[in-house]
Image: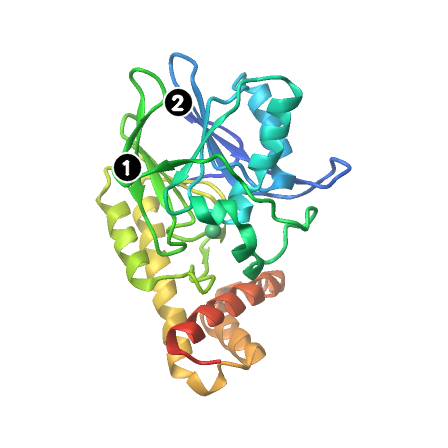
Amino acid sequence: MGYIYKTGKFNDNTWLIDAIYLNKEGIQSRNGHATYLIQTESGANCLINSGSRSGASTVYETLKKFGAWPLQKLILTHSHWDHTQGVITLREKVEEEGLAPIEIFASEKAIPNLEDQSYNVCFEDEPYYSDYLNIEGVSPLKDKEKLFLDDDFYLEIIETPGHMPDHISIFDEKNKCAFVGDAPGMRWFTNFFVCNANSVYWQEKDYLESIEKMRSLDLDYLCIAHFGVFTDSDIKRFLDNSVSMYNTWMDIFNQNNEKLNDLKFLLDLIWDTVYKDFSSMPVLKISLESVVKNALNYYKGLQNIN
Ligand SMILES: [Zn+2]
């Protein structure tokens, strides 16, 4: 199978955990974001991304179920709230249980963003926690750095900006597994790909270079944050689709330069042309609106259009 999205173990050292959103009463509301647990043979536990605050409770319960709590390390791929605010929840659990603090890591470039979350207001809100809380005490990682989880097992840090300037990917050479966060974009549904440009922080040149870095890795598993793991030929297919979908959307914006303030027109145009095979699933169009809006914000910034 080319795609894994359910919680569970998928290679010798790695588990996918779906950080399902829970409301304040603990009721499941929707799928969350894929977080990944790495457990070494010696029992060291490292999590890649925490999920949001309302998703981290699921992560915590699942880690306990897998015998992987407490965590020793947690690496954040980038500073967006939906992958980092869960740090607040996990730290609360550590404090309640009197455990040793989890070492939290992120790109050196992410540290100022984590310490001042105000930039996150450009995104849709976390559904159950309206405030984005600042995250202090994060250790910086540099490009090409090796982070050892125990004496034998290490992860290599690879800068993959574009989606966000502070984005890193994490490469596990032993299992040929790369954790690439949002760097190549997301996958919503079978064959439903959207443009990955989602904020004014987007950088096209960096994104394309990061895709090339991912292509150059010898991989059995490509692990993205929305929502799972690609294997086999689907790794290349996903990376190819990410770039071609980005180019398709930018072409549409280029060709409709006089309509950039007409969101409805552009949404209809994209839906009726790019996504014509999905016309029987109109709910996807509703979700597409905010993605078009964010991509347009980026595009207008690029072109200096208000
Ligand atoms: Zn992101």
Asked which secondary structure carries label 1, the reply is loop
Do callouts 1 and 2 mark residues in contact (Cβ within 8 Å)?
no
Where residue 86 sits, quadrant-wise, is: top right
Considering every residue shown, the one lying at the far bottom of the view is 258
What is the three-letter code of the residue carrying label 1? Leu
Q: Residue at x 39, y 12 (%)?
A: 42
Q: Residue at x 54, y 55 (%)?
A: 120
In this figure, which residue is indicated by the disc labeled 1? 219
In this figure, which residue is indicated by the disc labeled 2? 13
What is the three-letter code of the residue carrying label 2? Asn
Considering every residue shown, the one lying at the far right of the view is 25
Q: Which one is in front, 24 or 224? A: 24
Considering every residue shown, the one lying at the far top of the view is 42
Depicted 288 relative to depicted 39: above or below: below
Asked which secondary structure carries label 2, the reply is loop
C-alpha separation, residue under disc 1 versus residue under disc 2: 15 Å
Q: Residue at x 52, y 19 (%)?
A: 68
Where residue 174 sits, quadrant-wise, is: top left
**Image coords of residue 113 (percent x, y):** 47, 49
Residue 221 as seen in the image, left or right of residue 58:
left
Q: Which one is in front, 80 or 182? A: 80
**Image coords of residue 252 (percent x, y):** 41, 76
First in residue order: circle 1 vs circle 2: 2
Quadrant of the frame with the N terminus:
top left
**Image coords of residue 101 (percent x, y):** 52, 23
**Image coords of residue 65 (percent x, y):** 59, 20
Residue 226 shows in this picture: no
Depicted 233 relative to depicted 100: above or below: below
